[in-house]
Amino acid sequence: MSKQDVILCESLETSLARAIEKSPHDKLFILTDEHTTDLCMPSLKHVSSLKAAEEIIIGAEDTHKTLETLASVWQTLSEKGASRHSLLINVGGGMVTDLGGFAAATFKRGINYINIPTTLLAMVDASVGGKTGINFNGLKNEIGAFAPASCVLIETDFLRSLDSDNFFSGYAEMLKHGLISNTAHWAELLSFPTEQIDYAYLKQLVGQSVQVKEDIVEQDPFEHGIRKALNLGHTVGHAFESLALAEDRHVLHGYAVAWGIVCELYLSHIKAGFPKDKMRQTIQFIKENYGTFIIDCNNYDRLYEYMQHDKKNTAGVINFTLLKEIGNVSINQTANKNEIFEMFDFYRECMGV
Ligand code: GLY
């Protein structure tokens, strides 16, 4: 997989003009959603090379990450004369960068694309690393492809208009990057003043966070090994998300990951010796900032079943990424049903459910 250029922008317009210049193309398309077009497109109005671009606007939120939306993007590209040498620019959150990336990866067997993530989750995770796709058959990201953007342009000024829930949703992935990288970065993240955000400092932390992900993706772009480190918190997190979906409870991805981290740090502690004090400090931060996803013992079997169907498993064996220490990752770990049920007991006890 070719390496992506990930740029923490000083001036988005200048960086974008340069990125477009470096990607020779016959036609230019911009994909965005109905919220982002009003909120973020004005920040690009001085880029002269965008004047002739065709804008494609899709519905916002995960409910639109569907085959129908994807087909509508293919349709517009086709009708507006896109060729294999056209360039697509995705401007939006993870839904837009995932779906747009997949549209680009598949249209005429693949065209170049640039990502401009506008949410924290998309900046530190979704838009970086080449995972693209859509939801299908009730399953998240069931269909997709590894296809890196030629360039990812990160403009943290967009974060100034992000609501608190979406801020914390992205911040959970940063916390994960802290846990899998080093103690200093983890400690900085736990002491970040989330009530009074210092945006210059946030930009610096975003840069560090993206670097953690880039370093891992560079070593293992197709997730055969160490890229699984990025799945910390996600085995349980995805089960919480599935339960929330089935019960019509609104849960943002990063919140489910944060609660998943609580569970998986417990497993890390009992199975890999992760230090209790660091587990407690991390859980305290999550409890204070993310509240609690309420479960009771009647949910355990269902959550276990969701985990058995996780696409990260091989031959039905539940796959966890655990930690021996901060920055010391054990991939391809498993746990039996008893341990998993004890993990849920622990979660309920320490989160006060
Ligand atoms: N979101 C985890 C990864 O990109 O591998």
Image (tube, rainbow, N blue to C red):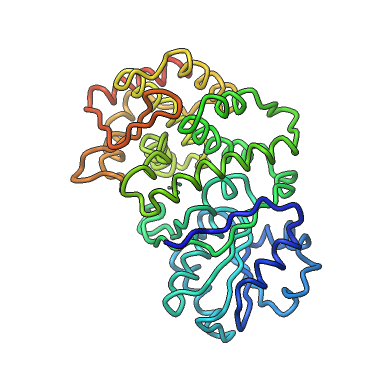
Q: Residue at x 40, y 53 (%)?
A: 221
The residue under the point 52% across, 53% down is 128
Q: Position of residue 180 (x, y in %)?
A: 45, 33
Viewer-proximal residue among 323 and 255? 323
Seen in the picture, residue 232 relative to 67 is either above or below; the reply is above
Identify which residue, 201 or 232, lies in the foreground: 201
Name of the residue lying farthest toward the right: 46
Residue lying at 42% horizontally and 31% vertically, measured from the top left: 260
Q: How many marks?
A: 0
Question: Do we see residue 250 in this rendering?
Answer: no
Seen in the picture, residue 100 relative to 347 is either above or below; the reply is below
Q: Is residue 111 left or right of residue 87?
A: left
Q: Residue 345, located in which quarter of the rendered image? A: top left
On screen, residue 116 versus residue 141, left or right, reads: right
Q: Quadrant of residue 48?
A: bottom right
Q: Would residue 326 be found to the left or right of residue 163 on screen? A: left
